[in-house]
Amino acid sequence: RAKAEGKNRFCFYSDALQAGATRREILNRDLQRALDRREFHLHYQPQIALSDGRVSAVEALLRWEHPQLGRVGPDEFVPLAERNGMILPIGVWVLRTALAQLAQWRAALAPGLRLAVNIAPEQLADSHFPHALLDALQRHGLPPDAVELEIVERALLQEHRNSELMTLKAYGLRLAIDDFGTGYSSLGYLKRFAIDAIKIDRSFVAGLPHDTHDAALTRSILAMARELDITVIAEGVETRAQRDFLQAHGCGFAQGFHFCRPLDADGLERWYRGGARAGAPA
Ligand code: C2E
Ligand code: MG
Ligand code: MG
Ligand code: MG
């Protein structure tokens, strides 16, 4: 029966495709009900202190299991959700789910653990967002500096988004610039928002240690961050050689398949109990 159903569903989708509905239109439509149908879940990927290997934080990464199309990646559906407005309720779900998980881990697994969470520019423009975030922190008894908001440079370009960010910063939440160096922006925002951390984009990490351009960029970012007293997290670290280069040039933290792939909550917990250590980052 399940097989027949699967086949019908497949027919339905291929009919929809034949009728001219693009995959994008289908995803756009189905995003509206994915939350109610509980099709989202979170994976978590650890961030590692290079000095001693402890886990400083975990980044929550959103996953969508579409009933017919299977796993759809956030790089594909988050931009659609940003455009059709669904990123607002989805973003609140991500915050609530991830903060509940963090509270549980801090109580039972790793007291100093932090959560890094991706925040879309549209969420920053929503005046309800700071309230939803502070509410979730309070409900779980979490200190504001247990959470690091990852935002991309373009989120800082529009003035009307800045006041929410300033409010959250004043409450003690940490701010990180994601995919640092790939957006266009003046560096003035590093000071204006008292940015705590920058994440070196994995497109720069990929060429380490041999690509001279990537190596020069990485060294420059690390030197600048050191001067400004900003923490650096390298993303997409896949090899020992990349890790060694980053450590040798003073990068504090790293994240990537070399250490651990994003895992569901149970998987992350098993991995952690298998030998990782956690504590508040320096
Ligand atoms: P991001 O925040 O820059 O996340 C890093 C991406 O790199 C993740 O992809 C992660 O799985 C992947 N990654 C981690 N380590 C490695 C590695 O060693 N090698 C390679 N090749 N990739 C690695 P993912 O999970 O597909 O997420 C893609 C993007 O989707 C994220 O980029 C973020 O911009 C967005 N995203 C994910 N979850 C959320 C969310 O809850 N809310 C919002 N607004 N955006 C999200
Ligand atoms: Mg991120
Ligand atoms: Mg990134
Ligand atoms: Mg990215």
Image (tube, rainbow, N blue to C red):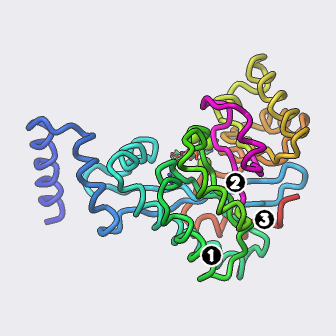
The answer to which image quadrant residue 64 occupies is bottom left
Tell me where residue 244 appears, x and y as whole percent. 85, 36
Give the spatial CA distance, label 2 vs label 1.
16 Å
The stretch of residues the image draws in magenta is: 174-197
The residue positioned 15% from the left and 54% from the top of the image is 9
The residue positioned 84% from the left and 60% from the top of the image is 281
Question: Is 59 on the left or on the right of 11, as rendered?
Answer: right
Q: Are marks 2 and 3 in contact (CB under 8 Å)?
A: no
Q: In the rendering, which numbered label is found on residue 275? A: 3
Tell me where residue 112 appears, x and y as whole percent. 79, 71
* Element assignment for label 1: helix
- The numbered mark, 1 or 3, whose residue comes first in the sequence reads 1
Q: In the rendering, which numbered label is found on residue 175? A: 2
- The numbered mark, 2 or 1, whose residue comes first in the sequence reads 1
Q: Amino acid at mark 1?
A: Leu
Q: Mark 2 vs mark 3: give the one in front.
A: 2
Give the spatial CA distance, label 2 vs label 3.
29 Å
Q: Are marks 1 and 3 in contact (CB under 8 Å)?
A: no
Label 2 CA crowd tier, 10 Å (few <14, some 14–19, many 20+)? many
Q: Is residue 217 above or below residue 125?
A: above
Give the spatial CA distance, label 1 vs label 3.
28 Å
Residue tagged 1: 137
